[in-house]
Structure formats: structure tokens, C-alpha cells
Image (cartoon, rainbow, N blue to C red):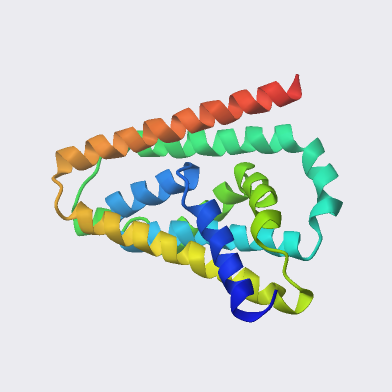
């Protein structure tokens, strides 16, 4: 597998893993809706960065070496992920949406990106999906590995750009009341995902 075929295979992997709704999707949509397209896209970019890290490890053959370590730490990772999701949920739920410029600019791109990287790194679903999808669609030659990774990144970034841009465009058509309701719903979903992750951690540890 070389050249364009490696890139397309990587793009397939990127779309398959990025498109399904999960914690990062909810977080991206919530931030794009409340803070605007830049905050939403920065959140997606953080998720794309972590996906590229995991993909690089898998393509370079690092996966088998770290799998035993991750397996032994899976309960801890799930618990940390649960705590982070519950923290995000609490922050979202206690915030009242305002469309004033000062509030809309309160969350910067760097803050959104860094928190998204932390959340994505602690999300055990990403490496699990990658392990399931990657062997089925991509087995790149060493010379084509970087091209395939570029395809993963390009597909993931494209999806987050579409999501954040579409949601931000919708934002201008909604009033404050509806935005507050959607914001609370997003917080509840993040909280539910956190509870499920905590239950998973507890189940792994007993």
C-alpha cells in the first residue's frame, strides 16, 4: 500500500473513528454552540491530535509493547476519564449562556484544545476502536506510514471543521432560552457518559 491508497485508507480510519457520537462529539458541539466555531474546532483539533498519536503508535508497532501496561491501568484510566467528564458536566450545567461578546470570547482556542487533548487521551474508546478498525482497512508499508497517518489527521480535522462550523452557524438562529436548554442537555449527556465510565471502571476493578 503506497501513495494515494495509503492516504485514502487513513482517511477511512479517521472518519470511522471520529464520526460516531461520543464524549468528544458532545463536547465539540456544546462549545461550538455556546462559544462559537473557533472553540468548537479547537476541541475537535485536540481529539484529532490524540487520534494521530494513537495511530502513529499502532502503525509503528508500539501497540503490542504498551498493551499490557494499558491493560493493567485500564480501571484507573476509566476512573480518570469519568472524573474528567463529570467535571466538564458540572461546569457546563452551572453556566448560564449569554450571547454577549465578552462571554462568547471567554473560552479561548488554547484552553479548548488542551482540555480536549486531556479528555481524548483518557477516553479508552479511541484506542479500542482504532485496534478494531485499523487492521481491517489499512496495513501500510513502512514508506507509506506517514501518508496514512496524514490521511487519518485530514479526515478527522475535516469532520470537526464541518461539525463546529455547522453548529456555530445554527447558533445565530437560536435564542438564549433554547441555547440554555441545549447547554443543559449537553451537560447531562456528559454527566451520563461520566457515570457510565465510572461504572466501567468499578466493574474492571472488582
Q: Is residue 75 left or right of residue 28?
A: right
| Residue shown at the point (34%, 58%) measured from the top left | 164
Rendering quarter of residue 35: bottom left
Q: How many numbered marks are there?
A: 0
Measured from the top left, where is residue 191 in percent x and y? 45, 30
Measured from the top left, where is residue 49 in percent x and y? 57, 62
Measured from the top left, where is residue 139 in percent x and y? 73, 64
- Of residue 112 and residue 185, the one placed in the foreground of this image is 185
Q: Is residue 84 above or below residue 110?
A: above
Q: Is residue 16 visible?
A: yes
Rendering quarter of residue 109: bottom left
Measured from the top left, where is residue 137 in percent x and y? 64, 59
| Residue shown at the point (61%, 74%) measured from the top left | 5
Q: Quadrant of the C terminus?
A: top right
- Of residue 21 and residue 176, the one placed in the foreground of this image is 21
Q: Is residue 114 visible?
A: no
| Residue shown at the point (55%, 47%) measured from the top left | 119
Q: Quadrant of the N terminus?
A: bottom right
Q: Is residue 153 above or below residue 91?
A: below
Q: Is residue 3 above or below residue 91?
A: below
Q: Give the residue furthest to the top.
A: 206
| Residue shown at the point (66%, 28%) measured from the top left | 201
Rendering quarter of residue 122: top right
Q: Is residue 206 above or below residue 168?
A: above
Amino acid at each position: 500500500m503506497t501513495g494515494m491508497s495509503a492516504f485514502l485508507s487513513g482517511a477511512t480510519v479517521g472518519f470511522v473513528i471520529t464520526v460516531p457520537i461520543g464524549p468528544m462529539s458532545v463536547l465539540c458541539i456544546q462549545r461550538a454552540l455556546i462559544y462559537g466555531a473557533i472553540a468548537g474546532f479547537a476541541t475537535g483539533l485536540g481529539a484529532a491530535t490524540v487520534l494521530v498519536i494513537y495511530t502513529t503508535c499502532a502503525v509503528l508497532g508500539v501497540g503490542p509493547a504498551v498493551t499490557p501496561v494499558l491493560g493493567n491501568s485500564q480501571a484507573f484510566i476509566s476512573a480518570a476519564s469519568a472524573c474528567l467528564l463529570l467535571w466538564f458536566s458540572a461546569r457546563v450545567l452551572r453556566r448560564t449562556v449569554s450571547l454577549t461578546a465578552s462571554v462568547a470570547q471567554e473560552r479561548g482556542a488554547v484552553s479548548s484544545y488542551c482540555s480536549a487533548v486531556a479528555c481524548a487521551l483518557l477516553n479508552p474508546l479511541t484506542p479500542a476502536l482504532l485496534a478494531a478498525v485499523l487492521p481491517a482497512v489499512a496495513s501500510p508499508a513502512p514508506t507509506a506510514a506517514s501518508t496514512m497517518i496524514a490521511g487519518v489527521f485530514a479526515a478527522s480535522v475535516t469532520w470537526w471543521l464541518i461539525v463546529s462550523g455547522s453548529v456555530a452557524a445554527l447558533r445565530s438562529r437560536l435564542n438564549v432560552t433554547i441555547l440554555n436548554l441545549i447547554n443543559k442537555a449537553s451537560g447531562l449527556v456528559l454527566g451520563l457518559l461520566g457515570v457510565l465510565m465510572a461504572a466501567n471502571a468499578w466493574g474492571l476493578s472488582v
